[in-house]
Image (tube, rainbow, N blue to C red):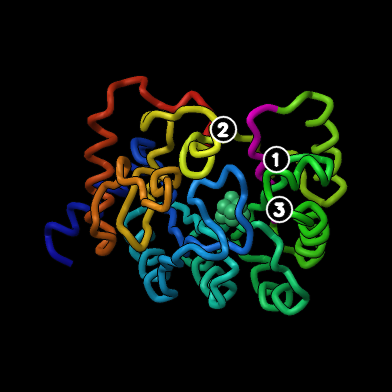
Amino acid sequence: MSDNSTTTTGEIAAAVAQGRLPGRVWMYANYHCNIACAYCLTESGPKVARRALGPETMLEIGRQAKDLGFTDLGVTGGETFLQPHMPDVLAQLADLLPTVALTNATLFSRRLLDRITPLAGRDIALQISLDRPDADVNDEMRAPDNFAKVVTAIPALVQRGIKVRIATTVESIEDAELDRLCALHRDLGVPDSEHIIRPIVRRGRAQMQGFGVDAAQSDLPAELTITADGAFWGPFGPTVNGGKLDTDLLITRTMLPLSVPARALLGLVENRPQGADSTLNIR
Ligand code: SF4
């Protein structure tokens, strides 16, 4: 390792250890999806370009993230499980660092469930979207039969020993409706500690549809995020609007070596005004 890369490794590891830089590195595995939710940040759908990271690239990002001193990995999309190699890649990433992978949980056939069974017992959680306790209301923003597929998939995953986290993305939700949603996820085998509620961010399709909260850069977590198009300030950065990639939160076109975007992100974070951390609970 050169002196320069050794310095970068030390800088990044220290910044993560001291809490100056978030420890998670995200990867956008792909941009295409089998459904097209009304608030999707990436305007994902069945017909969009895949813009995928290949399995070797994902593993290299994971290895370099670990070497640099990052502490966690995240995998998002698009629908991640449209990538046929995803079960194997996730198992290998989880062997490097604790990992969370986002999925809409609509593709979990018996065959796919069998393929992901090796994730049981590994340090990985599948984060699944479930927004409402009633099928019709939930599916309005997502897709027909989405609710039914999700409430079938979650217990099947839990029974196999795979950790599930539920993400609820809403503009607002009444207390009584939230109580019913929480009762539902507990029934499905997911504890309160694995349920997150977050606002719709007004980017991507949400912006086109007039949904969500405006979020400035300082509102968005500065988690290094790697896509096929380069590195971004957080997983809410590489959004798509009107079919075009947003580049306002692009850090570098270089994705590897990971030290290049990591160092650039650290520079931006250190120049941020004091007290400019997120207040919107966006995660
Ligand atoms: S929000 Fe997720 S599940 Fe919905 S269209 Fe976008 S990528 Fe697909």
Q: CB of residue at label 2: within 8 Å of ligand 1? A: no
* Helix, strand or loop status at disc 1: helix
Residue assigned mark 2: 211
Label 3 packing within 10 angstroms: few (<14), some (14-19), many (20+): some
Looking at the rendering, which quadrant does residue 154 occupy?
A: bottom right
Where is residue 79? Give x, y as percent: 57, 61
Looking at the rendering, which quadrant does residue 51 occupy?
A: bottom left
* Helix, strand or loop status at disc 2: loop
Residue assigned mark 1: 193
Looking at the rendering, which quadrant does residue 100 occupy?
A: bottom right
Q: CB of residue at label 3: within 8 Å of ligand 1? A: yes
In the depicted view, which residue is nearer to us: 43 or 107?
Answer: 43
Q: CA distance from mark 3 to mark 1?
A: 27 Å
Asked if residue 59 lies left or right of residue 41, the reply is left
Q: Say whether residue 169 is magenta.
A: yes
The kind of residue on which mark 3 rests is Ala
Label 1 packing within 10 angstroms: few (<14), some (14-19), many (20+): few
Q: How many marks?
A: 3
Residue assigned mark 3: 143
Q: Residue at x 48, y 62 (%)?
A: 48
What's the magenta region?
164-172
Regarding residue 172, the answer to whether it shows in the image is yes
Contact, mark 2 vs mark 3 (Cβ under 8 Å):
no
